[in-house]
Image (cartoon, rainbow, N blue to C red):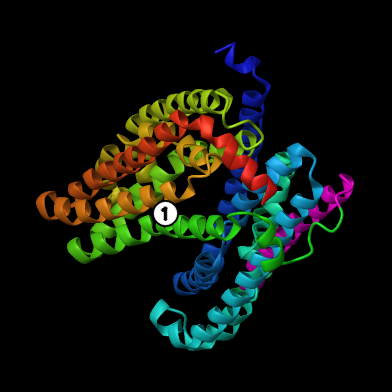
Amino acid sequence: MKHWFSDGVFRTIVRNASYLGSGKLLGALLGLIALACAGRGMTPALFGTLVLIHSYANGVGALAKFQTWQFIVRYGAPALARGDENELRDVTGFAFGLDLASGLAGMAGGIILLPLLAQWVGIGHDDIGLALLYCTLIPTMTAATPTGILRVLDRFDQIAVQQIVTPLLRAIGAIIAYFGHFGFPGFVLTWYVADLAGDLCLWFMAVQELRRRNIRHALRPGLFGPASRLKGAWDFVWTTNIAHSIWAAWGPVSNLIVGAMLGPASAGLFKIAATFFDSASKPADLLSRSFYPEIMRLDPTSRHPWQLAIRSAIISGGMGFAILLLVMLGGAPLIGLVFGQRYIEAYDLLQLMTVSLIVSMASFPLESLLYMAGRQRAALVAEGAAALGYAVLLFVLIHMFGIAGAGLAYVAGVSLKTLTMLMPTIWAYRDRGSLSHIMTREAHG
């Protein structure tokens, strides 16, 4: 372990993950303050409407969003390492153009569809005006270009600071709205201003860092021009977009299937267990966000990035084992404290699902390695195959074992995703000698 931390890149991965983790933790605490004020300052129905308005805009944004930060890291990090600022400008300009186009399209679609979908999603007629206002945030919600720029320029400290801006402003605004008795409009305005300020802060940080590095004209939006000079650009953004959509659909689709087969009560139990599982696996997500930019600066034909993956996986898997023990010992009291004793049944389901936590956390480097090796289509196929297998197992095992079957299917789905990612990753490692030719072709477009 001492030898591992003598590696500067490995130390950077852990350090950046620590930055992100500290920001997430403080943001979560501030978010609880905002939710507490909103819950006490409004009726349950109005509080639910606020959540629905925010969720609608976020949902539309998620459908329209491209993973441009991954594109910037994938193409921008090697360009920056070579000192090729012209290619870096093409990368950031293409990402910005894509964010701009998808954000405006998402906003237009969200505004047009809202009057038709409002009643179906639970937003009342009197609240449509505020919901339409909230849809104007979709372009800034979907923009991932500034995040990609800060990651490529190794400013995870600034990303950590920005993660606090929105929850801090939301908490302050919620306190003011609560004690000022501003009611529902006041809380909606608080959420709106906090989201907008947080997004604009990220853009400001990215622009300032580009200026500090004297990288000019990096945010001139373009689509077809820059893409023609970046080999495989469209293939990468569409592939990662579809893969992300498949991954993002796991949770909602699972809840719908459980609810349809076993009823709303079981769906609620599954949702609670899945929420705790996602929270427990958050350290792996933070490590992944730090790991990906660092390996993109390395030579994929060498053993270094692959060794870093194994070391990071062991660290993450060890954290998963520790979290597993904590869940086993303290999961039941925590669920009872947060949700009430009537939801304690979710602990049995959580215990079952947590078996896959070590596998889930230890396998986080696989997707990044496939992107590094230029095998994003293999990642998409693996994601799709695992999702399809999980859906089938969910139907079959729920029919056989009830709510416990949903937990078994979740464990099987995570394991299947890991296996389908692992196989092409091993092949990529064995063929890593050929990656130099791929990188050369991409560099010269």
Residue 373 or 56: which is nearer the viewer? 373
Residue sitting at 69 percent across and 40 percent down? 78
Q: Position of residue 180 (x, y in %)?
A: 69, 69
Q: Where is residue 105 in the image (x, y as percent from the top left)?
A: 59, 77
Residue sitting at 64 percent across and 31 percent down? 298
From which residue to which does the magenta span run? 188-215
Q: Where is residue 217 in the image (x, y as percent from the top left)?
A: 84, 59
Placement of the N terminus among the 4 image quadrants? top right
Q: Element type at marker 1? A: helix
Q: Quadrant of residue 151?
A: top right
Answer whether residue 276 is magenta in the image.
no
Question: What amino acid type is highlighted by mark number 1?
Answer: Trp
Residue 82 or 182: which is nearer the viewer? 82
Residue 3 or 60: which is nearer the viewer? 3
- Residue 168 against residue 370 in the figure, above or below: below
- How many residues crowd mark 1 within 10 Å: few (<14), some (14–19), many (20+)? some
Q: Please name the residue that numbered disc 1 is placed on.
A: 247
Is residue 263 rendered to the left or right of residue 291?
A: left
Main SS category, magenta section = helix
